[in-house]
Amino acid sequence: MNLKKVLPWVLLAVLLVTVLAVRRCNTKGNSELTDTEKQKRIERTDEKREEEKTDNEKSSLDVFRDPHAKYYFTKHARCRMKCRYISQEEVKEIVQRADVNYRKSDLEAVEGPKYALEGITSRDKQHVRIIVAPKKRHLTIVTVIDLENEWECPSCK
């Protein structure tokens, strides 16, 4: 038998046994808790999640409201803005007011969270949704959507 072929399988088997043993120990420890202790543990976990969510929402909104934030407009966003007659200044104004629609946001995106910000443009009162992806050094404007009117943008596809 060739040792080079067998060794990875042996290591894999040892790792699997270790993982199963650790999982069993953790499960065994949790089953010894009373129902009251389990409920308290769940409540503490929920409270921590709520605190983290609130902190994350505040820090995200702070980023949007920063008047000195740098903006990067994707090619798609620029095309949509042109079709819908929306200026960069109007986009920045709406982003800074930051009404976040969490149902339309994707906070778990692989490339980073994307927020759906909604507002009314100052110039012609369009109700728009702006998809923003905060990055370390700037805010990326992914797209701009008019929520009331369908616009023909054949060149934006």
Image (cartoon, rainbow, N blue to C red):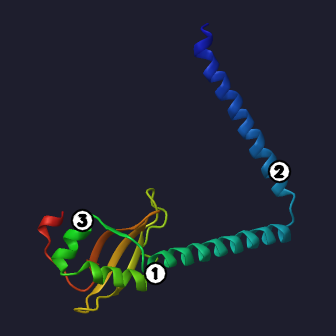
Residue in the picture at 34% in, 76% down? 130
Whether pointer 3 and pointer 2 mark residues with C-beta atoms closer than 8 Å, the reply is: no
Helix, strand or loop at disc 1?
helix
Vertical relation: 42 (above or below) 89: above
Q: Which residue is mark 3?
A: 76
Q: Earlier in the sequence, mark 3 or mark 2?
A: 2
Residue in the picture at 79% in, 71% down? 39
Q: Which residue is mark 2?
A: 28
**Label 1 crowding class (10 Å Cα cut-off): few <14, some 14-19, many 20+?**
some
- Farthest-out residue, top: 1
What type is the residue that disc 3 sits on?
His
Viewer-side label of 2, 1: 1
Q: Looking at the image, which is closer to me, 78 or 20?
A: 78
Q: Which residue is mark 1?
A: 65
Q: Quadrant of the N terminus?
A: top right
In percent of width and height, residue 51 lies at 66, 75
In percent of width and height, residue 131 lies at 36, 72
What type is the residue that disc 2 sits on?
Lys
Viewer-side label of 3, 2: 3
Whether pointer 3 and pointer 1 mark residues with C-beta atoms closer than 8 Å, the reply is: no
What type is the residue that disc 1 sits on?
Arg
| Image quarter of residue 100 | bottom left
| Image quarter of residue 10 | top right
Q: Report, in whole angstroms, how far the alpha carbon at label 3 lies from the one at label 2.
A: 53 Å
Q: Report, in whole angstroms, how far the alpha carbon at label 3 lies from the one at label 1.
A: 23 Å
